[in-house]
Image: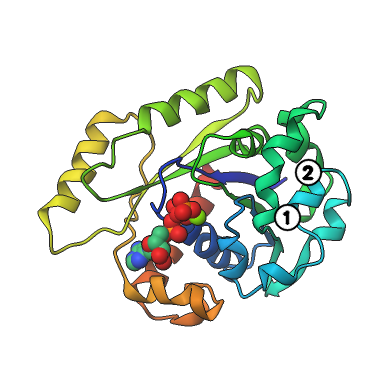
Amino acid sequence: MGRIIAIANQKGGVGKTTTAINLSACLAEAGHKVLLIDIDPQGNATSGVGIDKNNVDKTVYDVILRECSIEDAIIHNVYDNLDELPSNVNLAGAEIDLIDIDRREYVLKDEISKVRKKYDYIIMDCPPSLSMLTVNAMTAADTVLVPIQCEYYALEGLSQLMYTINLAKKKLNKKLEMEGVVFTMFDARTNLSLQVVENVKDNLKQNVYKTIIPRNIRLAEAPSYGKPINLYDTKSTGAESYRLLAQEVMDRDKKI
Ligand code: ATP
Ligand code: MG
């Protein structure tokens, strides 16, 4: 049975989508079968792998509304070993639609359970909010991976995020665990990045990945080419660091 990982942080622009795409791609490169689920109406984890988000037939929204099966919405072999359940702006309506739905926290979990045996890893890219979509992801997940940007306000909002994760664990998903925290956009030229890493480590008693993702222009460019970093610039420091992160994620499976 594979692991289902929700990539979440309600703070915007911290590297959730960059991590979702490139961790998925590096796990796929290592030979694992991966499903990337975009549950953000911004659809960046959809366009970022080269899918035209405004021209997809079915999205995660249709799946959540139970208007189509998850199998029918999944786009297969976007890249080798990598399938995608796409999203676009239609998903913005889901918050309202879900209000009337029975067991609304479990909609995504119920659908994912139909395909989870086909995948080694299922990675979900969450929106920058603690909305019903993020709650659905936490209900469906085995673990939550939290990207933290190395900037001055890094700690802001983290206690609220941890509180939500614990609440989801208590009320909706007893087996939910923290996957860990990964630092992103580390800038070796500034002391600030280092201070942030130390500060967060001191304040947060969580598993912190040894791999720190550096600020790397190639990572910022890759989505406009619709490619994950390992295919856009395979020797870049961005590609190397996401490979190392993928290795740490895979190593965790051996420990369990
Ligand atoms: P949102 O909350 O809006 O969904 P996010 O948390 O998914 O944002 P990203 O979209 O991954 O964050 O990243 C925000 C911006 O920073 C993007 O333009 C992305 O290309 C850029 N970026 C992310 N990680 C890096 C990095 N390590 N080096 C350089 N640029 C990066
Ligand atoms: Mg995003």
Residue found at x 14% / y 51%: 192
Packing grade of label 1 (10 A; few <14, some 14-19, many >=20) is some
The label nearer to you, 1 versus 2, is 2
The quarter of the rendering in which ligand 1 is drawn is bottom left
Percent coordinates x, y for residue 101 in the rendering: 81, 30
Q: Using the image as rendered, state which of residue 127 and residue 108 is in the foreground.
A: 127
Please say if the residues under marks 1 and 2 sit with CB atoms less than 8 Å apart.
no
Q: Is residue 167 above or below residue 85?
A: above
**Left or right: 91, with 18 as reference point:** right
Residue 207: x and y in percent read 39, 37
Q: What residue does disc 1 label? A: 119
Nearest to N terminus: mark 1 or mark 2: 2
Looking at the rendered structure, the secondary structure element under dot 2 is helix
Q: Amino acid at mark 1?
A: Tyr
Vertical relation: 27 (above or below) 239: above
Front-most of 249 and 93? 93
Name above or below for residue 172 compared with residue 241: above
Q: The residue tagged with tag 1: helix, strand or loop?
A: loop
Residue closer to the observer: 227 or 100: 100
The residue carrying mark 2 is: 64
For the residue carrying disc 2, how many other residues have a C-alpha within 10 Å: few (<14), some (14-19), or many (20+)? Answer: many
The kind of residue on which mark 2 rests is Ile
Residue most toward the top?
Answer: 170
Q: Considering the image in quadrants, where does the C terminus appear? A: top right
Where the N terminus falls, by quadrant?
top right
- Tell me what residue is drawn at x 45 percent, y 40 percent: 10
153 vs 160, left or right, is: left
Q: Quadrant of residue 244?
A: bottom left
Would you say 158 lies left or right of 62 here?
Answer: left
**Mark 2 C-beta closer than 8 Å to ligand 2:** no
